[in-house]
Image (cartoon, grey):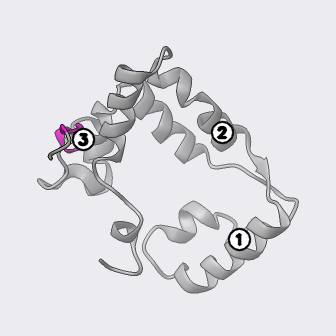
Amino acid sequence: MPEIGWESVTVPSAVSAWSTLAQRFSTLPLNTLAQPAIDYARHGFPVSPLTGQLWQRGYDKLRHQPGFSDCFAPQGRPPSIGELFRNPAQASTLQQIADSQGESFYRGGLAQKDGGLCSRARCRPDAGRSQPASR
């Protein structure tokens, strides 16, 4: 498992698992369940002292990774403590995932965008399905 890079923090079947869990165990649809995260990404949140310190550490270590600064330091620096951080691209991504029940991530626009992480064969949406416990 790599220590740095998107593959170190990404579980390809996670999106499928969100959809499956919402369908099987929730009384609410995925787009309703995801709405708070979408709202935080779209409208922003104030960076807390602890988050600000950790964000700075992460920036120092990861800023040269492809896509990191674009996503987490869009002004060329990590957000300051108390600053309102917005991530409209993340909001759009989450909205597309929620509206398509995850299909966009595996087969739709998100899968094709910039050679999307899950456009590779190893990202199968069925990988998030639960299996019966073995005894």
Q: For the view shown, which residue lies furthest in the bottom direction?
A: 61
User: What is the number of callouts on the image?
Assistant: 3
- The residue labelled by disc 2 is 42
Percent position (x, y) of residue 53? 76, 75
Q: Is residue 17 left or right of residue 125?
A: right
Tag nearer the camera, 3 or 2:
3
Rendering quarter of residue 70: bottom right
Query: Is residue 57 on the magenta stretch?
Result: no
**Image height of 120 relative to 15, above or below:** below
Q: Residue at x 60, y 44 (%)?
A: 88
> Could you tell which of marks 1 and 2 lies nearer the N-terminus?
2
Would residue 15 be visible to someone looking at this image?
A: yes
> Could you tell which of marks 1 and 3 lies nearer the N-terminus?
1
**Image height of 7 relative to 118, above or below:** below
Q: For the view shown, which residue lies furthest in the right direction?
A: 82
Q: Residue at x 37, y 71 (%)?
A: 8
Q: Is residue 11 left or right of residue 63?
A: left
Rendering quarter of residue 4: bottom left
Percent position (x, y) of residue 110? 33, 42
The amino acid marked with disc number 2 is Arg
Mark 1 Cα within 10 Å, few/some/many (few <14, many 20+)?
many
Percent position (x, y) of residue 66? 42, 73
- The residue labelled by disc 1 is 78
Q: Tag 2's secondary structure? A: helix
- Alpha-carbon distance for marks 1 and 2? 17 Å
The amino acid marked with disc number 3 is Tyr
Q: Which residues are magenta?
A: 126-132
Q: Tag 1's secondary structure? A: loop
Q: Quadrant of the N terminus?
A: bottom left
